[in-house]
Amino acid sequence: MKSVQRTRLMLSTLGLLSCLTTVMPSAAAAAYPGDGPAPLRSLKQFGARGDGVSDDTPALQKALGQSDQFCLDGEGLTYSVNGTLRITKNLCLVNIRLEQRQVPYDTSAMIKGDCPAISDPAIVVSCGDPALVGDAPAELQAYLNVRTLLVRPDDVRRDISVFMDKVVIDKGNDPRSGSRTDAAGIWIDHAKGVVLTDVEITGAGKGYGLFISASSDVTLTRLNVHDLTWAPYAGDADLTMAGVAASGWNTFPIREFRYAGQDGLTQGGFKGVRVQEQISCVTIASSNHVVFRDATIERCGAEFAEGFIPWQADGLTVGGTSSDLTIEGDTRIASTWEGIDLIGGNDGIDQVHIRGATISDSFSFGVKWGYKVSNSILEDTNITNAGLAGVVIYGPVRSVAVNDVRISGIGSVNFPTGVSSPWDGNKVGLLIAAGANPGTRETYPQGVEIDGLSVNGGPHCHRGYLNEGGSQIRIAGSRLTNCNFSSKLD
């Protein structure tokens, strides 16, 4: 495919950028002033201590204010950060560990009532909590919106470049902190030329591990995002497996904060919503020419009374209008809500090539292609232990292929108490779910080619393959076994 050839050409070019030693490579330094590489400067030259105890936030912010003049070297030390570090210029950052030490905010005084059951994800309801008079306290806003590294130009009409090598971000130890849409370990907006090599993100709190939006020419090599956990805000109901299962794994009510004017509300405060993914380990939104190579994404979930559960925390999400994305090499995704989630909006997602991935213990789906996805391939991939389906394709999806994909252990997920089947209803190896294209009478998905599919279901599998209404589906060379109800290709 032409898209694959273009991707390989881009890989061979961007591969030149991954050989940082003591200075930034001249190719990556092209956006910096002068003819040569950006000079390497120790963060200690800006007053940072790097002892893991002192608050280095002011010194780091001072250094990052000159990030277009120097390649900043952490010298392998640990730097404590309180809140968000804001970068508005080209960035080169190497050999550093940042640990988030934001001051906790006790939300229990703002959460007093009981939330009703909520089935519609678009609905925001009152749970009888005290009304918030005026604006939210600044300390609460900082607690909800913490982004350890926020890289975004002041003028979004001017893209910036980002280079990181051997960078570790620890989001902290408070799983109640952050918010689903406004917090992150690393947040990158409007960048052209993003090269992250050996970047690790871990720690507690809601939001994103890595979020990249409105960017292009992105290469992520040996990205390691792991052990991200969340919990309801202080004062909200704690999580138990029995309690959540009784309300519904996908319909449990929780609190999220809303500002006055948001969602049509006249007063801000904590409101009841139907739970949606509170964590995304990695999200790529409205970006083009993106390459993942040898990524590890694992153990993203919620803190239950029983321990860690991979619940409402996605592994890798691709959204918005995005194109030309490749996932290759030794990519491993384990213990997440959904392993890979493609949810194209607006003009949709085009030309995604996933090959050689290993996905295990997905609470719901191993791979999900939904809304608008086209001209994409999933191949040579192993999917083990998915609670609902190994692969699900639904909505206005067209011209996609599933080749040499091996699925096993349908309906089973590893929990702290052992392996169990959390969901009621049918569990399927590969599910094609019908959907209509808005404004037309066309039935989707359309044009799905399946070749070499292997499903070894297990005791909880009902069907190896199920087509609920897609059209122009072609299946060849597939083998389905050990599904209790049916293994037929019908």
Image: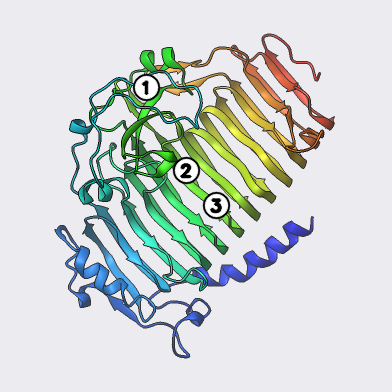
Spatial separation of the CA atoms under disc 3 and disc 2? 18 Å
Residue located at (50% from left, 30% from top): 121
Q: Identity of the amino acid at label 2?
A: Ile
Please tell me whether residue 458 is drawn above or below residue 255 in the rendered image: above
**Above or below 60: residue 337:** above
Assign a secondary structure to mark 3. strand
- Name the residue that disc number 3 marks: 285
Q: CA distance from mark 1 to mark 3?
A: 33 Å
Drawn side of residue 4 relative to residue 159, left or right: right
Q: Position of residue 287 (x, y in %)?
A: 58, 57
Label 2: which residue? 297
Dot 2: few (<14), some (14–19), or many (≥20) neighbours within 10 Å? many
Q: Nearer the viewer, mark 3 or mark 2?
A: 3
**Horizontally, is 408 left or right of 157 in the view?**
right
Q: Is residue 222 visible?
A: no
Q: Point out the frontmost of discs 1 and 3.
A: 3
> Between disc 1 and disc 3, whose residue precedes?
3
Circle 2 SS class: strand
Q: Report x, y in % for residue 271.
A: 35, 32
Q: Quadrant of the N terminus?
A: bottom right
Q: Which residue is mark 1?
A: 416
The quadrant of the picture occupied by the C terminus is: top right
- How far across and how far down the image is residue 275, in percent? 43, 29
Q: Residue furthest top?
A: 485
Q: Residue at x 34, y 35 (%)?
A: 230
Question: Colour mode?
Answer: rainbow
Instruction: Give the mark, 3 or 2, whose residue is nearer the N terminus.
Output: 3
